[in-house]
Image (cartoon, rainbow, N blue to C red):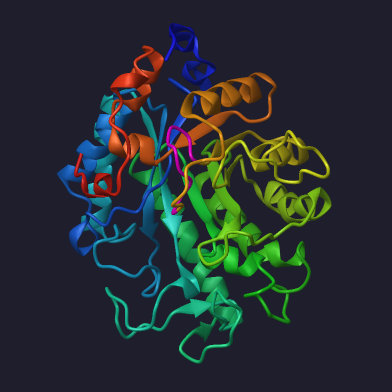
Amino acid sequence: MDQKFAGHTLFQSVPFGTKMLESRLVLAPMTRMFSPNGVPGENVAQYYRKRAENGIGLIITEGTAINHPAAVMSPDIPRFYGEDALNGWANVVNEVHQAGGKIIPQLWHVGAARKAGSEPNIDAPPVSPSGYTLRGQRNEKIKALTKEEVTEMIYTYAEAASNAKRIGFDGIELHGAHGYLIDQFFWELTNKRDDEYGGDIGERTKFAADIVRACRKEVGPDFPIVFRYSQWKGTDYQAKLAKNSTELEQLLTPLVEAGVDIFHCSTRRIWEPEFKDEDPSLNLAGWTKRITKKPTIAVGSVGINRAYLSNQDNDNVTIVDNLRIIDEKINAGEFDYVAVGRAVLADPEWAVKLKNGKLDQVLHYTKESEKYLI
């Protein structure tokens, strides 16, 4: 790769709340299941530190379980409750800060994506807005949340946000993407409620907005709340919450009013337009920033040749082409930060090699990369 990328816009220092990031690069959250009994150990701390000290400005942790028995589906997914797990996270935060990075936890509940009988709590049934699967089918093994349980769930997210601030994190991310619990409230296929948490696309945002408001009350005005959302789902890559920019505005406006600071806009290919009939140049992050006027994180196949879970190479878009497109879009003000996942999973020095014009030395992602400890 030629040396002109050494001055890449990705390596500009940028604000994050009241703090500054050393670069626009964000480590995308990636579930790794390396936390036995839900407790992140020293290997997890070093995994994140290694990426922070090699050019990543903001670390977003892998999804962490909020304090609900059906939040996740493995005992090795890290918890964000219990002093043992929180002490482990405090060590992670310390290591990342020593390396000059910033870090936020991703707060997660998988909802109906969890199979009945899954660990760590095999007797806890999966929960969802209406007892539907991610295929839109009623399933008696999935419990529809009562109004009281919805209220309790909102409090549980807020409690996690409070703990994040207490132990030194630089903000939080709420996982509202990919067909997990918050997203199941957004999606008409899984939300059939007839109370105030159901209805049209704007009304279906109430659960997420209430969570944001509750978190904001706990953490105060200056603690960044990042909200991750997506159109696509783990069970349907073609799914659309919003079919056009008008519907997207209806979805996002309540979240802005509730207190979201930054939107993390998950797409499978960062360069693809979201509503090409309206504007063939804007991806989901670009549309989100235009609508909300909030900073956005763009993500999707950065630094790799294949999109998430794809068996085909990207359509005529090389890694270098991808980076040049990103550079142009940042300069055009379409988005503010860029999240990188598998490229940095495979090579913790990916960002430094990019900055120094040494992409030819990068260790490229393979499935085996997912087994790396550091």
Q: Nearer the viewer, residue 162 or 172?
A: 172
Q: Is residue 58 left or right of residue 260?
A: left
Residue 152: x %, y % from top left: 51, 72
Q: Residue at x 43, y 50 (%)?
A: 106
Q: Residue at x 83, y 42 (%)?
A: 278
Q: Quadrant of the C terminus?
A: top left
Q: Is residue 119 above or below residue 23?
A: below
Residue 282: x %, y % from top left: 72, 36
Q: Is residue 208 left or right of residue 313?
A: right
Query: Which residue is the extreme one toward the bottom?
Result: 140
Q: Is residue 5 left or right of residue 346?
A: right
Q: Residue at x 69, y 71 (%)?
A: 188
Q: Is residue 357 above or below residue 365?
A: above
Residue 71 shows in the view: yes
Q: Nearer the viewer, residue 93 or 30?
A: 30
Q: Quadrant of residue 34?
A: bottom left
Residue 156: x %, y % from top left: 46, 65
Q: Nearer the viewer, residue 128 or 348?
A: 348
State yes or no: residue 150 in magenta.
Answer: no
Residue 332: x %, y % from top left: 70, 21
Q: Quadrant of the N terminus?
A: top left
Dominant SS type (magenta): loop
Q: How many marks?
A: 0
Q: Quadrant of residue 290?
A: top right
Residue 18 shows in the view: no
State yes or no: residue 306 in magenta.
Answer: yes
Q: Is residue 134 above or below residue 93?
A: below
- The part of the chain drawn in magenta is 301-309
Q: Residue at x 22, y 40 (%)?
A: 45
Query: Which residue is the extreme one toward the left?
Result: 42
